[in-house]
Image (spheres, rainbow, N blue to C red):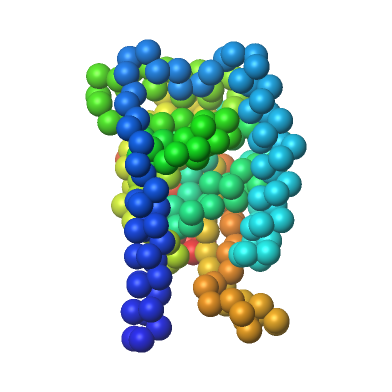
């Protein structure tokens, strides 16, 4: 019981820290450019993504989380676009998803609040983050941008649980968005599951929190399935692997 209370306290501290960083205004209007096509922006984005962020994050996630990734082939060798989904349980889980995808371009949908953090808003934009508009009137261009990416054979990541709860060890209810895009564009869902394990060897002497394994599961294709069935099948498959 004491360990559980300590874990809850630590998780609350993580969330409070994230919220404390959100100090800037960020509004999405009908002219917002979700996926910039400017050549200079795309060049800078690719340099930052592949040459700087990827190798640095690979080292950081190994040191901090002893990250292990299973099933990389289930996403790296897909020949079409796909919607990837995962449970949202770590501040850096988007980086881990990117590492699992290798040289496949992965775009990440994110809550608009993430773009209120100074400096980070610029960084995550370059790292292919796409804000989800709150105003229904501004969602037309958002939907179009995601559809175009999937039709072009790229990967788009969603957190169907919507909110981050650090180190949560059970699946929460899924929103519909990811599964709607899968059906609209006839592309597979690639489920990913974050699980936790106790540190071993020397790590257990200084590591309080658990280490991380990311499991990339086999694609689930939408043909002949309604949204609810696709969502339930994905939820069940992820649940079996937690």
In this rendering, would 20 be left or right of 188? left
Q: Residue 230 or 123: which is nearer the viewer?
A: 123
- Residue that sits furthest to the left in the current view: 136
Relative to 121, does residue 160 appear above or below in the rendering? below
Q: Residue at x 41, y 31 (%)?
A: 131
- Position in image of residue 44 (x %, y %): 66, 25
- Position in image of residue 34 (x %, y %): 46, 22
- Position in image of residue 137 (x %, y %): 25, 19
Q: Residue 135 or 81: which is nearer the viewer?
A: 135
Q: Quadrant of the N terminus?
A: bottom left
In this rendering, would 235 be left or right of 190? left
Q: Residue 242 or 211: which is nearer the viewer?
A: 211
Residue 49 visible here? yes
Relative to 207, does residue 31 appear above or below in the rendering? above
Relative to 13, does residue 161 appear above or below in the rendering? above
Residue 171 visible here? no
Residue 70 occupies which quadrant of the picture?
bottom right
């Amino acid at each position: 019981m004491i360990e559980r209370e300590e874990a809850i306290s630590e998780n609350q501290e993580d969330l409070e820290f994230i919220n404390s960083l959100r100090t800037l205004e960020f509004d999405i209007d009908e002219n917002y450019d979700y996926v910039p096509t400017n050549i200079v922006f795309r060049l800078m984005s690719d340099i930052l993504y592949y040459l700087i962020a990827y190798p640095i994050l690979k080292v950081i996630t190994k040191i901090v989380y002893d990250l292990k990734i299973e099933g990389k082939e289930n996403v790296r060798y897909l020949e079409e676009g796909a919607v990837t989904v995962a449970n949202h349980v770590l501040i850096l889980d988007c980086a881990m998803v990117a590492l699992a995808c290798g040289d496949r371009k992965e775009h990440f949908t994110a809550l608009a609040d993430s773009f209120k953090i100074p400096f980070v808003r610029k960084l995550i934009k370059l790292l292919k983050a796409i804000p989800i508009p709150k105003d229904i009137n501004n969602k037309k261009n958002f939907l179009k941008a995601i559809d175009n990416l999937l039709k072009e054979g790229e990967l788009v990541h969603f957190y169907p649980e919507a909110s981050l709860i650090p180190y949560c060890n059970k699946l929460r209810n899924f929103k519909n968005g990811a599964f709607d895009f899968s059906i609209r564009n006839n592309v597979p869902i690639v489920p990913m599951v974050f699980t936790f394990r106790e540190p071993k060897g020397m790590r257990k002497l200084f590591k309080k929190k658990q280490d991380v394994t990311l499991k990339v599961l086999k694609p689930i294709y939408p043909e002949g399935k309604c949204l609810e069935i696709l969502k339930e099948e994905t939820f069940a498959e992820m649940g079996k692997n937690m």
